[in-house]
Image: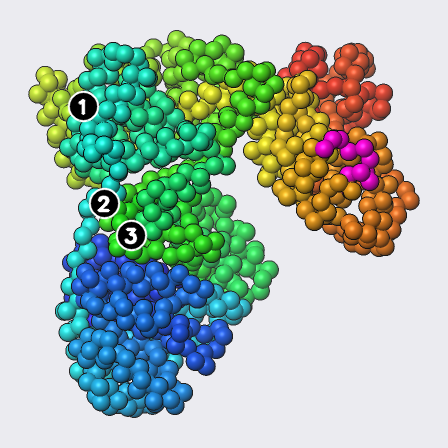
Amino acid sequence: MHLHVHSAYSLLRGVCRLEALIQRVVAEGMPGVAITDWANLYAAIRFVRLAKEAGIRPILGAQIPLVEESPQRPSRGDPPAVVLLAESEEGFRGLIRLVSLAHDGPEVGVSWEAVKAHAPGLFLLSGGAEGPVDAALARGDTERARDWLRRFVEVFGPNRAWLEVQDDGSERGRLSHYRLVSLGEEYGLLPVATADVHYIDPEDAPLARVVQALRQGDDGAPPPSPSPRWFASSAEMRARFAHLPQAVNAALEIAERCRVELPLGRVLLPSFDVPGGESPDGYLRRLCQEGLRQRVGDPIPTSYRDRLEHELSVIARMGFASYFLIVWDFIRYSRERGIATGPGRGSAAGSLVAYALGITGVDPVRHHLLFERFLNPERVSMPDIDIDFEDERRFEVIDYVAQKYGQDRVAQIITFGTMAARAAIRDAGRVTGLPPALVDRVAKLVPASLGITLDQALVEEPRLRALKDENEQVRTLLTVAKGLEGLPRHTSTHAAGVVIAPSALTDIVPVQRTPEGGLITQYDMASLEAVGLLKMDFLGLRTLSIIEHTRELAGERLGHAVEIDEEYTDPKTYELLGRGDTDGCFQLESSGVKHVLRDLQPNCFEDIVAVISLYRPGPMENISRYIDAKHGRVPIHYPHPDLEPILRDTYGIVVYQEQIMQIASRMAGFTLGQADVLRRAVGKKKREVLEQQRAAFVAGCLRQGHPRDLAEELYDLIVRFADYGFNRSHAVAYAVLSWRTAYLKAHYPAEFFASLLSAAMASADKVAQYVEEAFQRGIEVLPPSVQTSGAGFTVREDGKIRFALGAIKHVGQAAVQAVLGARRAGPFHSFEDFLSRVDHRACHRRTVEALIRAGAFDELGENRDELLGRLERESHWGGGGAQLTFFGEESPGRRASSENEQEKIRHEKELMGLTFTGARVYIRVKRGGPETLKQLGQVLARHPGSWRVRLVRSSRDVRELGDRWRVQPGPGLTSDVEALLGESSIVYHLT
């Protein structure tokens, strides 16, 4: 029986994968096993569930470093550590608090006083070779060892503390056992045999050494450990400790006493403070009725009233009123603070209660959404409401929740970064000392597909397969990489997950501090669900910020608030969608979706919902049929007339999961709750489950008077579409955002592009893409200016967009604020005026040089090189003389010559990702002689401007018309050129 085992969640220490560990325990016929990961309980819940499924006893523990007890410890070494095992639920709670404390300071570990405070219900093992007793004896400090033994006995007593003996395979090691046992007998402490398991098979030892090297940052694997650290069989352990059989027996005796039963499957909701002593159910009902009257009018229509009563009764029966009130409260806070929230996400959009409370913005009755898809009374599980907030203000809401419920009750959720295929190859290559060029070559042969494994890469890439077959070093590299692949490597914070507990989190789950000081749980999302804690996703959605910023900019220019058509009838928006003019429109940006929109020519909101749902692998095969049916090119077929109301909006095609549920309800008489159970069960594709559900569905159809062959046909239809069906509630909510962005782009294009550009400032490629598209639409984007540019992109009264100072490389927010602050006193009269008024501590020399190179001072009418020279003569901005600039050039005290156009273009591209100096219009002339060129010249003459024209026949044939032809980009020029030369013959290019 092994009581000292490191799983792979002892990050970069152990390599025992949980599933393989459990399988080995079962195969060896052992009654149970402990995991004692280094200062954490990351794997505790998953370990317990796997062990229970396998019929073995899970023993929960951890190896706890003692950070105050590390005299003469090497700077890179670990502090001495003891192993703590939970004897009881009280002990496990103490262990939770200890591993939480271990991650609450600058060094991972706890004091002995902390161990003492949380000792009840815990067993202590001395830690073996890594423990304080063995460490003291190894230094020859017997008195220090005795001191530790006294501490063990004082805190735990002789019946709850043991001395670990471990085998290193040497006679000297065995002799040391006798010495340790003899010392322990003085204090009544007995020995227990452990193997300090870090890997499962002896063959895994090299992999364990590679992992150790990665943790220590070594290039090259360390020498083999003198101690065998694999998962030894019972017979092997008895052979190793034949001289101490009582130590082997002690492990079984300790395991027998560890009886922790974790209460999984509970619901642990925080209480919501209801005003006036009203019950949560009563308060929720009152809020819903008030909210629904505001939404749909007073009196509330019968269909809404009945639906509301049904949902409230289910919520009350399942005990989830407080959950809805908690969500309502922080949504209310967000709206009061002007923080934009999304119309809904996931199945929560199917709840009328959520709509009435303002949690969602989608009317589920109008859009035929199902409450049971969200909360099923026949399958009790925690509701899951995920909320989108504008990305720039999401943390304000998290802070509010933490302040309301308590900083110790609210945390974000941990995730584990695992080693992907390419990273595993590179890590393996670094520590095995193989030639870097070979390692790089092998890594680059792994296809750049999301989530691809090494096994899949070997199937998909014949060159990788061939290299493995012919090169021994590559075989070694891939073997080690395969062992690393998928192992957890580090922790990080879930992008959106937040958990709220009814009491201090450490009463229930272990936590730890992030490097930034935030609090995260040590349990991942699935483990938190298992223990019953309320978790929800607070997602930051850039689209919401774009929508709010667009409305704000348009309102400022027009002098009134901007409203969006929420009836989804605006012809201008549908025209934009039909053109596929959807760059920047939520969920509709890809070239494939644009193509679908052009073919579909959407004219109703249902079309947008369908496009979002169908444009995915699998359902895509139905897009052509959907389009042809919509336009009457193919007949619409319903398997049965009763299905027409369900499938009418999708032209006879099953598109949504809710349609599967409705088919089961209509044809087999299932309740919607039973239909949701069917949907989920069929989606798992387990043969036994499929047959059970088939029998139930067919029997239901027969009871409804339908023939068996129709019942079988419909069930096959359900099975076929179970994988493809999309969550309609989610699709409708996201289609609302698609509509809003398309509407704003159609009606307020300059403000929309300015908002889009501000949101994309971190990506120079995206900025260039959107600037070029703006020009093609006739919206001019002006170069940056210290006189008029803002932190983000702004719109002038004439509808032109001004480039943002914050989008220039090397110009940070502090520098931008310094410029804007100085400008409040009035425009800058000269370059020297700028230097005298702007705080040089925030806007330093490198920043000013970037502003000059980007053309932000051009409006002052001075040469850029002259400005750079004058900057260098200003001593408080960096002084004169030769200095290296961030472009890697040596700058003389004064530049005598002006930079040419090519240098300007190079610098602008480097700083902004595009160039205003080198802007070009490329016109593709595939065929035609002098007459065509003459006609083209006449077209260009009608659009005079500053952009130079280049004619292109192919990538190898580029001719310039010269300075004679310079044009102003815009829709008029585009349409005139395309009328002469055909579609896609003109491209505006700033990069």
Do the numbered discs 2 and 1 sit on residues whose CB atoms are within 8 Å?
A: no
Q: Nearer the viewer, mark 3 or mark 1?
A: 3
Q: Percent position (x, y) of residue 803?
A: 67, 30
Q: Is residue 724 visible?
A: no
Q: Which mark is residue 856?
A: none
Q: Which mark is residue 268?
A: 2
Whether 973 is drawn above or below 492: the answer is above
| Mark closer to the chain start, 3 or 1 | 1
| Mark closer to the chain start, 2 or 3 | 2
Q: Nearer the viewer, mark 2 or mark 1?
A: 2
Residue sitting farthest toward the left: 703
SS type, badge 3: loop
Quadrant into which the N terminus falls: bottom left
Q: Quadrant of residue 713?
A: top left
Q: Please give the name of the residue rendered at 20% of the width and 82% of the height, measured from the top-left corner.
A: 190
Q: Amino acid at mark 1?
A: His
> Which span of residues is magenta-colored?
825-835
Q: Is residue 182 visible?
A: yes
Q: Percent position (x, y) of residue 337?
A: 44, 31
Q: Please give the name of the residue rendered at 36% of the width and 68% of the height, measured from the top-left corner.
A: 110
The residue labelled by disc 3 is: 504
